[in-house]
Image (spheres, rainbow, N blue to C red):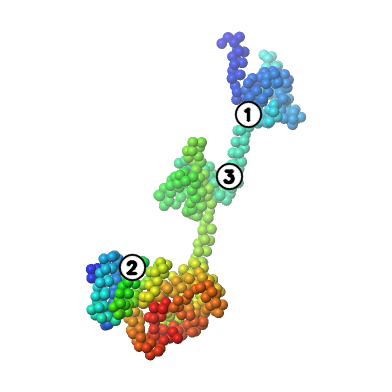
Amino acid sequence: MPDVVPIMRMGPDLLVTLQGDLDDRAVEQIEQEVTDQVARTSARAVLVDVSGLAVLDSFVARVLARLVSMVRLLGADATLVGISPAVAITLVELGVSLRHVNTALNAEQGMGRLRRLREGDASRWAGHDDRG
Amino acid sequence: MAVGDEPAHFRQMIDSIVDYEVIRLDEKGVISSWHPGAQLLTQYTAEEAIGKPVTLFYTEEDIVEGKADAELRAAAETGRYGTEGWRVRKDGSQFWASVVLTPIREPGGTVTGFVKVTADLTEQREQTLALRAGQQMLDGIADYEVIRLDSDGVVRSWNPGAVKLTGYVADEVVGRHVSMFYTEEDKRGAMAEREMASAARDGSLEVEGWRIRKDGTRFWANVVLSPILDDQGEVTGFVKVARDLTERREQEQLVQRQRDEILELSTPVIQVWDKVLILPLIGTLDSVRAARLTESLLERIAADQAEVVILDVSGVPAIDSGVARHLLKTVEAARLMGTASILSGIRPEIAQSMVHLGIELGGLRSCTSLKDALQLALRLVRAGADAADLAGRHA
């Protein structure tokens, strides 16, 4: 990991791009910087792009789940984007479900979903739910 | 040497012979001398043998045929007569004897007796027969190359199967190194030497590979190489059994290709709308097909950036817990990538059995018809309502 965690501000949202290998020190740094940024900018949502990670194993999966929990505690939504087919199969085989984590194919779709979610919140309050 | 010493020396010499029977017969074929070697061979003592006709050692059959007389006559006429045949010991057991009869003549030429030298060749005969049988057996094998190599890998024997397989006849091959059948690449890699070393170490080696015929064409050979060991356990050579598996290999490759094609056909992923894929499942799902299915579906999701996938199971005869587990894994993997799944075409009996099996659908949506599933998918994509919710929280 580079010394600076690339965090990009996109309107009310943050895009965090993770790259290379994650070791304990890097994980600590990411958690610190992401939580700092979310709190400082009052971000509505955080997109975490994992397509650049060298490995995505059960350790990294736990790290990501933890990061998502922290973001939620700070009042923002979190979405993981860029999980490849091979990684998805591996995670399922490992039994790592990341069950309560939102996912999206790419950053753009993730943004779209976050936006819809926000609009959906309003419609849900109005009683619309297509799950009927 | 004094003339008078001769009988004593002669006696000693004869008595010291134990591997042969050397006895004297008179001119009528009556035994007139005996020695320990003869007793060893026939089990008769001197008292029992001397004075008896030589037919004592003959089989009933040979006696009826008058073989003994005929042999003595032949010896008297030709000066030496050699023969092989079954002879009988005192206890009735038989041995394969090699017999040489030489007439003893007076100075005038009259035959006064015979010297009979007999050796027991039963064992040698067995070995010879066994060898001959072995050779005939090898010669009878036309579909396999069964050859012998010495410890350096030089070809020492050749059989018709080898001729048929390689096109070489024995004269062209025997005495040459076995590497002559290998490809240039294998020759450079000293493949023959490595195979022999491995066979010597492990007691046997089975390999498959390309070999070259006399006409330069190649064939896919299955080779079994076994070391020949001497009594001390040293490798003195190898037996090499080879056959042509070119056809089988081609068939296997064909079957594999066809299987791949069938798998490809049986897991078609169809894009029905922008960002909507349908995976129509047909027939029984085994683990190979199921794994292939997951793989091709996820790849298509990545390639098309599909937001919704419809898994249509109306063509699946039954869903057992294994298939259900696999479907749910596929759905889970798709969700991790950010894609929602809709199950369609569940029949009432499948719904019942799935619940009875304790299969949990989790947050997976299910529609009875493909039409409903498609409508739902389009609604999810176009209206964009609650898509993130669908893909994530309730899965």
What residue occupies the far bottom of the structure in this picture?
A126
Q: CA distance from mark 2 to mark 1?
A: 85 Å
The residue mark sitting in front, 2 or 1, is: 2
Image height of B114 relative to B202, above or below? above
Q: Quadrant of the N terminus of chain A?
A: bottom left
* Side (left or right) of B342 relative to A53: right
Q: Earlier in the sequence, mark 1 or mark 3?
A: 1
Viewer can see residue B374: yes
Q: What chain does mark 2 sit on? A: A
Q: What chain does mark 1 sit on? A: B
- List the residue tagged with mark 1: B120
Point 35% across, 82% down: residue: A113
Front residue of B248/B38: it is B38
Secondary structure found at label 3: helix
Q: CA distance from mark 1 to mark 3?
A: 29 Å
Looking at numbered disc 1 in the image, what kind of residue is underneath it?
A: Asp
What residue occupies the far front of the structure in this picture?
A73
**Tag 2: Cα neighbours inside 10 Å, few (<14), some, or many (≥20)?**
some
Looking at numbered disc 2 in the image, what kind of residue is underneath it?
A: Val
**Tag 3: Cα neighbours inside 10 Å, few (<14), some, or many (≥20)?**
some
Quadrant in the picture for residue B98 = top right
Q: Are marks 1 and 3 on the same chain?
A: yes
Q: Quadrant of the C terminus of chain A?
A: bottom left
- List the residue tagged with mark 3: B138
Front residue of B241/B169: it is B241
Q: Position of residue A93 (x, y in %)?
A: 42, 67
Front residue of B299/A84: it is A84
Image height of B193 relative to A74, above or below? above
